[in-house]
Image (spheres, rainbow, N blue to C red):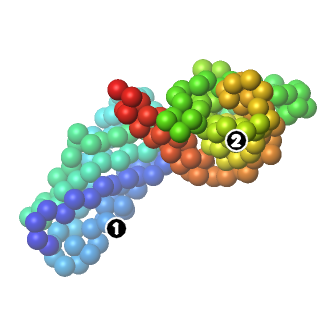
Amino acid sequence: MLGVLSLQLSTGFIIVGAYADKIRKTLFAQLRDAVKRGEVDSREVARASAELNRLLYRIVVDELKSDKGDVIRARIDYDVSGGKISWKYDTLKVEYFKRVPDDEVAKHVEKVVAVAEEVVAERIAYEVKEVVTTAMGDCVLEVMLGERKVGMLAATPLGDLIAVRGAVLEPNPVLVRGKLPAQGSMAETVRRGLQSLIEASEAVDVEEAEKAIKELEAVVERERGGSS
């Protein structure tokens, strides 16, 4: 192996009680070929995994006071050079998810199940907020659910109709495509017709919905950059 080999290790989502073993196995898997070629000693892989595990133990167990049933995902970049593994600690990212006790979860489940028919039937209180009007005349809007942004839409005037495209993430990810009869401004038209559009929309994976949202966020950035 010539020069420096730069890689990233990710534990994936894993319970706290198992992350140490996952780090060791993942590091050995990533460097399997280098070990076979004699470029890195297996003892160095074991040493590096133990070093990272000590650091994560301090963060997750000592600082966050985790339980073994909690979930984390850790990601970190590292270099391999001259047979040595060096962690880039300034790239370490740790996501942490606290397990809620079963009895507390059950209490909330029972509360909602008791009014299940009402919950399923009620209209979702979406709001739309105009963000920018593009040079081509499209109106880009954020979809809000309470204080959370849960989607992005673009409205395009087509005579007496407004064409709408975009995506909404909650409560279910959907790609929004459709046309609405113009009723006032484009934002007002979308506000009035959004529920019916979503009900007729295509259910998709979260990743696909997020991609559509990011594309519209990029439009907003371009328009704002061009107007500054």
- The kind of residue on which mark 1 rests is Ala
Image point (58%, 36%), residue name: 138
Say whether marks 2 and 1 touch (CB < 8 Å). no
Seen from the viewer's position, the closer of residues 104 and 12 is 12
| Residue 211 located left or right of residue 166 | left
Q: Residues within 10 Å of mark 1 (few under 14, many from 20)?
A: few
Q: Is residue 164 in view?
A: yes
Q: Where does the N terminus fall, quadrant-wise? A: bottom left
Image point (23%, 42%), residue name: 89
Assign a secondary structure to mark 2: strand
Which numbered disc, 2 or 1, marks the residue closer to the eye? 2
Residue 142 pos. (x, y %)? 59, 30
Image point (27%, 68%), residue name: 31
Q: Residues within 10 Å of mark 2 (few under 14, many from 20)?
A: few
| Residue 76 located left or right of residue 195 | left
Seen from the viewer's position, the closer of residues 131 and 12 is 131
- The kind of residue on which mark 2 rests is Leu
Seen from the viewer's position, the closer of residues 80 and 210 is 210
Q: Which residue is mark 1?
A: 29
Residue 173 pos. (x, y %)? 67, 44
Q: Where does the C terminus fall, quadrant-wise? A: top left
In the drawing, what numbered circle is on residue 158?
A: 2
Image point (21%, 46%), residue name: 88
Residue 225 pos. (x, y %)? 37, 32
